[in-house]
Image (spheres, rainbow, N blue to C red):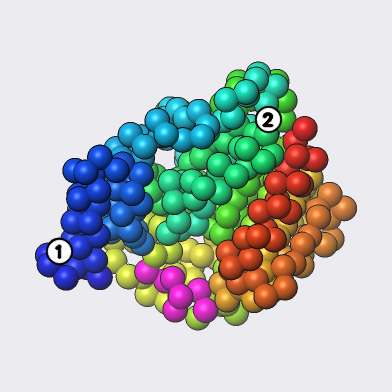
Amino acid sequence: MWADGPGGWCFEWSRIADRYAESGQPWLASLAYGGARYPCLADRPKAIAMQHQIEQYVRASEEFPVTFERRTVTTVVSGEVVEVPVHLLAGRDATAATPVLLVSGGVDTWKMDLHQMWIAYVLGAGVRVLAFDHPGTGELTHVPLTRDSAAVVDGFVAYARTLTTGKVGHLGFSFGGWFAAHSSLTEAVDAAVVIGGPVTTASFGPGHFHELAQSMGGIVGNAFGFAGPPTDAQFLSHAGTLALDDLVAAGRACRTLVINGDDDPHVPSADLDLWRGFAQADVRVIPGGTHCAMNKLDELLPTVISWLRSALH
């Protein structure tokens, strides 16, 4: 996985991506560079692959079925100013009244990786998408994923309010669902969608530790900001600070759709069921669905799109 030479993951994927780029196929090049930098930017070759992915994605944007802009949004995290590159995607008939939907993915699936899903929301739900990498990932790898890092969303919400006279929503996929849950429970946005998102100690506590550590311990540890694999004690200590039990106990939330498969190995059902206690929450379970119901996209996407149209328009 980490060998920087023939046979190495990043090396071989980058060779494939280089061929696509040289043959004038930027979309395929961006996908291949995305494979090269997977699963996290823990060394220089993967960081270089990420930069190539951005370059090729921007070139490919000329062929997108929607408008595309790459902008920088100023945010503040723990008192420090952080400039965040974001991607704006909108229908060609978008107006000042078109709602804005903030979106982000997981610790190893970032804003460019879920491009086709964002397009589905733009065209199906009639929203302007503001896609970002959340702290600890992608272009924000240098900002560790901490409880305080949720403040980055405040800057996005403020910026989104300048883009629309309508509503602002927040959709989070996998670990991005933690950020969307935070936005809901703090009522920072008008509506939120939490897809397979971890929320409380059910996900971040010792009871679920081995499942989380074994499946993605290194990737999450990288997002937390550790320079090497964390010890079990370090991992648990840091993960525990992310639990939003205090916000859940406060009992407030904006209008929220919470959805996941019933066979998710990464996020326990307790972090979906807790939302049943909120009158503003619409909880959906997709039978046979795995993490974020990715194996049931034909059920997930229409449900989310229909809900977004109702909640944001």
Q: Is residue 264 above or below residue 36?
A: below
The answer to whether residue 205 is left or right of residue 97 is: left
Q: Is residue 56 above or below residue 250?
A: above
Instruction: Specify the principal SS of the magenta part.
Output: helix
Percent x, y for residue 55?
Answer: 29, 37
Give how far across and how far down residue 155 sits, in percent.
54, 32
Question: Regarding mark 1 in the picture, which secondary structure is present there?
Answer: loop
Whether 87 is drawn above or below 262: the answer is above
Image-based side of 33 in relation to 208, left or right: left
Q: Are marks 2 and 1 in contact (CB under 8 Å)?
A: no
Nearest the viewer among 231 and 155 is: 155
**Position above or below: 73 against 194:** above
**Residue 251 in view of the camera:** no
Q: Callout 2: helix, strand or loop?
A: loop
Between the C-alphas of marks 2 and 1, the distance is 44 Å
Q: N-terminal of the two: label 2 or label 1?
A: 1
Specify the amino acid type for callout 1.
Asp
Q: Which corner quadrant of the image does residue 100 belong to?
A: top right
Query: Which of the numbered marks, if any, corresponds to residue 4?
Result: 1
Mark 2 residue type: Pro
Left or right for 38, reference 293: left
- Mark 2 surroundings within 10 Å by alpha-carbon count, few (fewer than 14), some (14 through 19), many (20 or more): many
The residue positioned 65% from the left and 34% from the top of the image is 127
Which stretch did the figure color magenta?
Answer: 211-218
Q: Nearer the viewer, residue 276 or 7?
A: 7
The spot of residue 105 in percent (x, y) is 51, 52
Q: Which mark is residue 99?
A: 2
